[in-house]
Amino acid sequence: MKAIQVVAFGRAAEVVKLNEVPELGSPGPDEVVVAVEATPINNTDLLVIAGRYGYLPPLPGTLGIEGVGRVIARGSQVKNLKEGDRTLIPVMTPTWAERVKFATSWQRPLPEHADANQLSMVGVNPATAYLMLTDYVKIPRDGWVIQNGANSATARAVIAIAKSLGLRTVNVVRREEVVAELKSLGADVVLVDGPDLAKRVGKETGGAPIQLGLDVVGGSSTLNLMNCLAQKGVLVVYSGVSGQPFSGSVQRAIFGEVSLRGFWLGHWRKTAKDDVTAAMYDYLVPMVASGAISAPVDATYGLERFPEAIAQAATFKGKVILTPGKA
């Protein structure tokens, strides 16, 4: 069986290999073997390759953290899936391989009409968006949430999920060119980042209190978001794509009682109960199947073309999907 593995941490061109790995064997009583159809290249994967992520696999380690595939074998006790069903692969299962094996719990058969590439991305970004919107602050209907990096895949999911929950979004971007596109996706307010962001946000929202901010950028953008939050607001930091240490406001933290929280899906999944996980994906999968949640796909590649795929993903022009069953 072929799998894309990292054999050391460093430059992708030097440390990522397509290797022959042992076959998975027959599934145990509660397991399925799944042929991987589609698995995205996430920023997480690039950070793992570079050795800069919060979790690093033992070497050599198969890469990938999410995906979708079809059941090709199931154990005697598996009742929720049958052979031929398309299903989500549990997050943090190494998916850059021809096949995976895992114990089933919350998995369901996925809609056949849905796009496999979009389904392959349900596991991480939409889940992150959903949990940040629902786990930190109880926002009233028609209440506001603000986020930066609003053109990212997770932020696009935030826009769609917030709308489905009856919430309104302020979306902060770094380029004027993406404003119209985000508004066409349902973003209520889209603004270009800057030190006067709080003043412009107040004008657009009529001074409505904003209790939740979502930060994917870091650097000075964190401070700009912090300045937009209401008394006792919560700023959730879930990445730092700028590569810069974030800056904050002592005044807002002390006198505004604004708090900062970090979010990582890896921590959440360690304690999440199966029924909670199932309910979340039952909410998200139909949104993906209908196209309400969608991430632009830049290109797809078979496993053998992994060097091109990784190089293309590093340009961040759109999602790159690996398709192990195709050339």
Image (tube, grey):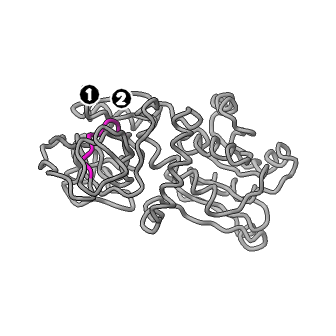
Q: Position of residue 201 (x, y in %)?
A: 79, 47
Q: Position of residue 115 (x, y in %)?
A: 44, 31
Nearer the observer, 64 or 148? 64
Which SS does the magenta portion mostly show?
strand
Residue name at image x 37 percent, y 53 percent: 90
Screen quadrant of the C terminus: top left
Q: Is residue 33 magenta?
A: yes
Residues at badges 2 and 1 in contact (C-beta under 8 Å)? Answer: yes
Screen quadrant of the N terminus: top left
Nearer the observer, 52 or 131? 131
The span shown in magenta is: 32-39
Residue 321, by quadrant, is top left
Residue 290, by quadrant, is top right
The crowding category of the residue bearing disc 1, from other C-alpha atoms within 10 Å (few below 14, some 14 to 19, many at least 20), is few
Residue 149 marker: none
Q: Helix, strand, or loop for circle 1?
A: loop
Q: Position of residue 54 (x, y in %)?
A: 39, 62
Q: Is residue 110 magenta?
A: no
Numbered disc in front, either 2 or 1? 1
Q: Helix, strand, or loop for circle 2?
A: strand
Nearer the observer, 50 or 83? 83
Residue name at image x 46 percent, y 49 percent: 124
- 3D distance between C-alphas at marks 2 and 1: 9 Å
Which of the two discs, 2 and 1, labels the residue nearer the N terminus?
2
Extreme residue in the bottom direction: 254
* Amino acid type indicated by mark 2: Thr
The crowding category of the residue bearing disc 2, from other C-alpha atoms within 10 Å (few below 14, some 14 to 19, many at least 20), is many
Residue 86 in the figure: left or right of residue 11:
right
**Residue position for label 2:** 300
Q: Position of residue 267 (x, y in %)?
A: 45, 65
**Residue position for label 1:** 326
